[in-house]
Image: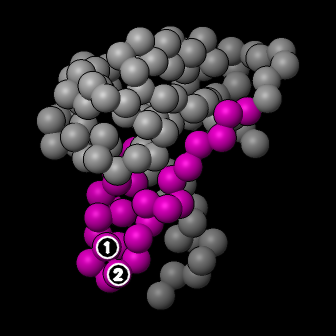
Amino acid sequence: MKNIEELAKEISYLNSTEINRLSEALLEYNINATIYHFGIIPSIGIVSDVEKFEVYMVDSGQAKLLVVKLIKETFGLGLRDAKYCVDNIPCLLAENFTYNDAKKIKRDFEEIGATISINDSNS
């Protein structure tokens, strides 16, 4: 068995779709990894475009179908992956985005009633 550091390093390279699939696989062993997906709004002073941010959906709001559609359009996911994200809140929508891109995603989703959190992925 690989040591914990190697396993953590491999997991850190997964994208959000792969993390969701990993969560599903862990459920087969009665491990609910969804509780480890969370977003915290950072306190941001001056933000550089070089810094990278993660975008989490913490609530899909009332218009779940519109949210699924926007996830599909924005991130190029299929219906199943988009619906999985809406059904498994909180959900990592995007990672390694500039602050301006993260704010645009947040604005687009909040226009249809979803609640979005932006995390600084550099810390």
Q: Amino acid at mark 2?
A: Asn
Q: Position of residue 38 (x, y in %)?
A: 56, 49
User: Which mark is on residue 27?
Assistant: 1
Residue under the image location 26 percent in, 31 percent down:
64
The image quadrant where one finds the C terminus is: top right
Tag 2 and tag 1, C-beta contact below 8 Å: yes
**Within 10 angstroms of label 2, few (less than 14), some, or many (20 or more) residues?**
few
Residue under the image location 57 percent in, 66 percent down:
8
Circle 2: element type:
loop
Residue under the image location 24 percent in, 37 percent down:
82
The answer to whether residue 95 is visible is no
In the image: residue 43, left or right of residue 102:
right
Q: Position of residue 111 (x, y in %)?
A: 41, 12
Q: Position of residue 19 (x, y in %)?
A: 39, 54
Q: Nearer the viewer, residue 30 or 10?
A: 30
Residue under the image location 41 percent in, 70 percent down:
32
Q: Which residue is mark 2?
A: 30
Point out the stretch of residues depicted in magenta: 16-42
**Within 10 angstroms of label 1, few (less than 14), some, or many (20 or more) residues?**
few
Circle 1: element type:
helix
Q: Is 34 located above or below residue 3 in the figure?
A: above
In the image: residue 117, left or right of residue 109:
right
